[in-house]
């Protein structure tokens, strides 16, 4: 057929995924890219819709500007100002994004949402013809993938080199698209999802188009509040003020499940609660992008301020002794903003050891910070860094030792006046959220007069998020 040169792109949505084709000055464009990429993205759009429906969210998928009759999608084509050397895999995403931002400034209507899929033709091919070169990962609401001459849905499941390659790179592209649509890694449940195959946000670059690949319900809960999955003009991703007020975690032997329940507060409607159980195995660490093996559950809010979930541990894969787990409770808000609170636990003898349930804390209303050895008052903003944040009851603020001028050296010390003599069973501390510069070793001393102190011994705090509780050997009474 003679080449089609004109298309009419429409979408039922006002806000659509921006699909950007970015070409450096010295890179050849692989032939037939418009057809090949259109077919890949139209497949993906259908996949997301089907998986949303299967998970109970209705046939709902990301918006895409497309010519329905000619089966082509709108590509925002941008000619890079520099050669491929300016856009390497490692560290090259910023240069690409800067040029896209400049292009967007002069072509604002070409972009209809905050979500960008940026596809760049491969720069380097190895001896076997394997493509590579450009950035290939998610960065916030943008994600990067590559294009190469044989990247074509017709090779999916076809076997051989081109079949394996298509699964790897197309599956990889759709996985990165998941990141660009706000999804973190998470894998299939060990037993109840075994028949579903591979989770997209696990290792879909080994299965896409070849063997079953699916979206977890946790993914769908996040996508359900995504800007390009909805068709309304509310503002997405605005800051919300939300917190876990109380959490109770216990292992129920009869149900062989972790039972989690509690209460939250938020100034914006929560649509879903998502619970990640993320083991730290093979020293992968914890936190963003280290959660490939996280296994997640979801629940709906109860009475707009409470949550309850049962998580059968037969569905967890890692249960060896002492594996550090993070339980991440995510509050998904109707404006797409997700607020996460992390708690640490471990397994012992095949069973979870859950010590993070909220305990009754003393009111800090009458507490005063009597003295401190160091605080940072210029380098951490207008609230953080100050010693008073140690006792403000707000887990999102933090103290930092003085560093911007005349950096202080440890040990650092604080004296807190409880206002009158109080009785306590133990100590609760919360590290800085995100665990930057955590506190490890501490000694607690008590006094009734603020002059002569008795040591209650040394503590080693965990490098983990959420409250940590330490019991005293016996009940203690003290004012300072
Ligand atoms: Zn990933």
Image: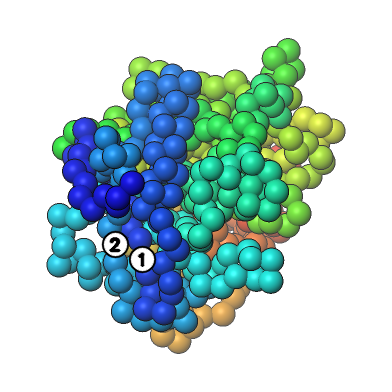
- Residue at 40% x, 29% y: name it: 49
User: Label 1, label 2: how many angstroms apart (C-alpha)?
Assistant: 6 Å
The residue that appears at 63% across and 52% down in the rendered structure is 162
Q: Where residue 407 sits in the image (x, y, percent)?
A: 48, 83
**Distance from mark 2 CB to nearest ligand 1 atom below 8 Å:** no
User: Residue beneath label 2, please?
Assistant: 77
Left or right: 94 as drawn, with respect to 413 = left
Q: Nearer the viewer, residue 13 or 162?
A: 162
- 24 vs 208: above or below: below
Residue at mark 1:
22
In this image, 102 relative to 425: left or right?
left
Is ligand 1 within 8 Å of the beta carbon of the residue shown at mark 1?
no
Q: Which type of secondary structure does the marked residue at label 1 adopt?
A: strand
Quarter where residue 57 is shown: top left
* Mark 1 or mark 2, earlier in chain: 1
Asked if 143 appears above or below 381 in the picture, the reply is above
- Residue under the point 63% across and 64% down: 130
Query: CB of mark 1 within 8 Å of CB of mark 2?
Result: no
Q: According to the image, what is the colour scheme of the structure?
A: rainbow
Name the spot of residue 423 as percent of width and height, x first.
56, 39
């Amino acid at each position: 057929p003679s080449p089609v040169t004109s298309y009419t792109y429409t979408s039922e949505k006002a806000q659509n995924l921006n699909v950007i084709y970015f070409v450096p000055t010295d890179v050849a464009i692989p032939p037939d890219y418009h057809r090949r990429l259109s077919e890949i993205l139209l497949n993906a759009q259908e996949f997301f819709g089907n998986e949303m429906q299967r998970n109970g969210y209705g046939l709902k998928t990301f918006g895409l500007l497309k010519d329905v009759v000619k089966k082509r999608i709108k590509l925002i084509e941008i000619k890079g100002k520099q050669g491929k050397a300016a856009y390497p895999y490692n560290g090259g995403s910023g240069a690409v994004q800067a040029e896209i931002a400049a292009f967007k400034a002069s072509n604002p209507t070409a972009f209809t949402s905050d979500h960008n899929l940026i596809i760049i033709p491969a720069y380097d091919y190895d001896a076997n013809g394997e493509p590579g070169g450009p950035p290939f990962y998610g960065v916030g609401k943008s994600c990067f993938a590559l294009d190469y001459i044989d990247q074509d849905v017709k090779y999916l499941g076809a076997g051989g080199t081109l079949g394996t390659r298509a699964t790897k790179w197309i599956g990889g592209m759709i996985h990165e698209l998941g990141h660009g649509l706000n999804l973190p890694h998470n894998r299939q449940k060990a037993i109840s999802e075994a028949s579903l195959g591979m989770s997209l946000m696990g290792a879909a670059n080994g299965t896409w188009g070849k063997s079953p690949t699916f979206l977890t319900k946790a993914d769908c809960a996040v996508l359900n509040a995504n800007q390009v999955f909805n068709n309304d003009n509310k503002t997405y991703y605005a800051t919300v003020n939300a917190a876990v007020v109380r959490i109770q975690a216990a292992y129920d032997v009869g149900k062989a499940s972790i039972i989690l329940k509690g209460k939250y507060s938020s100034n914006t409607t929560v649509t879903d609660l998502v619970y990640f159980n993320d083991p730290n195995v093979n020293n992968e660490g914890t936190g963003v992008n280290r959660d490939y093996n996280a296994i997640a559950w979801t629940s709906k809010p109860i009475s707009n301020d409470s949550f309850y979930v049962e998580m059968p541990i037969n569905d967890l894969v890692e249960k060896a002794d002492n594996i550090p787990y993070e339980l991440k409770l995510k509050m998904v808000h109707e404006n797409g903003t997700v607020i996460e609170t992390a708690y640490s636990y471990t397994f012992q003898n095949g069973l979870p050891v859950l010590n993070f349930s909220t305990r009754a804390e003393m009111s800090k209303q009458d507490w005063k910070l009597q003295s401190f050895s160091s605080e940072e008052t210029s380098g951490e903003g207008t609230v953080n860094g100050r010693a008073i944040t140690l006792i403000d009851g707000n887990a999102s603020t933090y103290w930092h030792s003085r560093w911007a001028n005349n950096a202080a050296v440890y040990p650092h010390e604080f004296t807190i006046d409880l206002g009158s003599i109080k009785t306590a069973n133990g100590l609760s501390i919360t590290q800085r959220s995100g665990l930057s510069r955590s506190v490890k070793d501490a000694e607690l001393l008590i006094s009734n007069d603020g002059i002569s102190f008795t040591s209650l011994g040394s503590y080693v705090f965990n490098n983990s998020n959420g409250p940590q509780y330490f019991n005293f050997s016996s009940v203690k009474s003290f004012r300072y």
